[in-house]
Image (tube, helix red, strand yellow):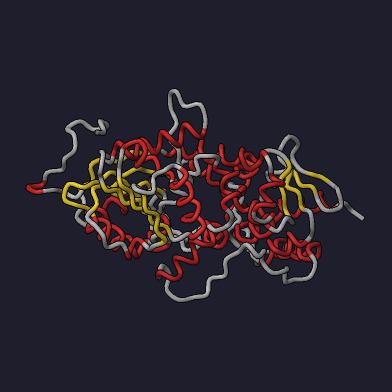
Amino acid sequence: MTPVAPRLTALARELLGRPFPLRIRAWDGSEAGPPGEPVLVVRHRRALRRLMWRPGELGLARAYVAGDLDVDGDLYRALDRLAGVVWGMSTGEAASRAGGPRRLADPRIRAAAGRLLALAGPLPPPPPPPEEVRHRGGASHTRRRDARAISHHYDVGNDFYGLVLGPSMVYSCAYWGDGITGLEDAQTAKLDLVARKLGLAEGDRLLDVGSGWGSMAIHAASAYGARVTGVTLSREQAAYARKRVADAGLTDRIEIRVQDYRDVTDGPYDAISSIGMAEHVGSAKYHEYATRLHGLLRPGGRLLNHQIARRPEADEAAYHVDDFIDRYVFPDGELSPLGTTVNDLEAAGFEVRDVESIREHYALTLRSWVRNLDADPGRAARLTSPGRARVWRLYMAASALSFERNRIGVNQVLAVRPGVGGDSGLPLRTRVWS
């Protein structure tokens, strides 16, 4: 019988209209494809059934998370090569886009698809991996649905996150530069940058929205003497943060709540930090988010909004949330263009005073997290689940490439609620934070 891998590479070329960019190793041990490239390991014919049932990236993700597909070699290089393959289309559409006037109606394409189906075995494929979220319908970004979404992403084990994030327990873009020797230093530099942009001083009230494992709250209280209220929807995060606060002897300065930001009513605050939280808000709710934070600040108070941004679409109405991210990583998460974020903040009454892009910093951060995960993959799988560890590895490596290739960005937006007579209370010179 003809080995499987050469058959797969030949079929891929017919369907795509060009050579498949990776080597392929099939379940029978055969291997074919361009030498020197990473190897796509097809461990089981189930992987083909998943891809034929959902030929977009969701089918690919399901096969990888389930362990039916793997990569032997440089994962970043493999993902970079695969970015040129049009996974998100049907077989015929992909062939048409890649090879000119090809259509599923083309008998050669139909024949190739039939041979692939015969190799894959009977459809349908097995159920999706258990790590996949099943959306149950109804409106997104209700309080209950947001709580479920946050739990899916963050309540997967504090020890697992400790392995990935390192001792800082900061799950957002670090700040790299001269004198930074590693991830922990870079995360401390980011927390300090936020504190300085907010102009924190002894006794200031800080609201930390999406407070995570308490790192920003602890830094603001210990280094600047701030009084901090941290809110999160993750019970596991809150329990971990409260223990850290107690261990640091800061219970008189820091309160950690399991609370929706929409339910915070004890303003005014002198400053608000929102670091990597606004991505969970949703485009339709962003104006409400900005308005509520504006209402929680005193006149002259500052907001530091640290948020991932996507590039604008030519047709914004056609924007589609990434299937893999939505089903496996951030359910109901949405990215907005930077301009949309700035417009919504200003429409809520804020004056935007500074925007700093730190896109390249996030690529460095993500690569550090992947190194941490790869240093002990067996322990990572034990601390959560093998599938969940694979989700995080795929998500973080692919995200690092997206930041490096300028497909997405991340920005710190400093905004102020103007005081009497429009006074901002900010220094005349930009990038001088006090």
From where the camera sits, is residue 407 visible? no
Give the total number of marks visible in the rendering.
0
Q: Eyeballing the image, is 216 above or below 231? A: above
Residue at 79 percent of width and 60 percent of height: 45
Residue at 40 percent of width and 37 percent of height: 190
Hey, which quadrant is residue 359 in on the image?
Answer: top left
**Residue at the left extreme, as displayed:** 421
Frontmost residue, 246 versus 194: 246
Hey, which quadrant is residue 152 in on the image?
Answer: bottom right
How far from the left and from the top, in percent, is residue 71?
71, 45
Q: Eyeballing the image, is 66 above or below 31? A: below
Frontmost residue, 386 versus 22: 386
Relative horizontal placement of residue 43, taking residue 61 as reference (left or right): right
How far from the left and from the top, in percent, is residue 59?
64, 61
Relative horizontal placement of residue 293, taking residue 186 as reference (left or right): left
How far from the left and from the top, in percent, is residue 404?
50, 38
From where the camera sits, is residue 414 visible? yes
Q: Quadrant of the C terminus?
A: top left
Q: Quadrant of the N terminus?
A: bottom right
Residue at 41 percent of width and 51 percent of height: 211
Relative horizontal placement of residue 351, taking residue 324 as reference (left or right): left
Relative horizontal placement of residue 5, taking residue 56 as reference (left or right): right
Frontmost residue, 145 versus 115: 145
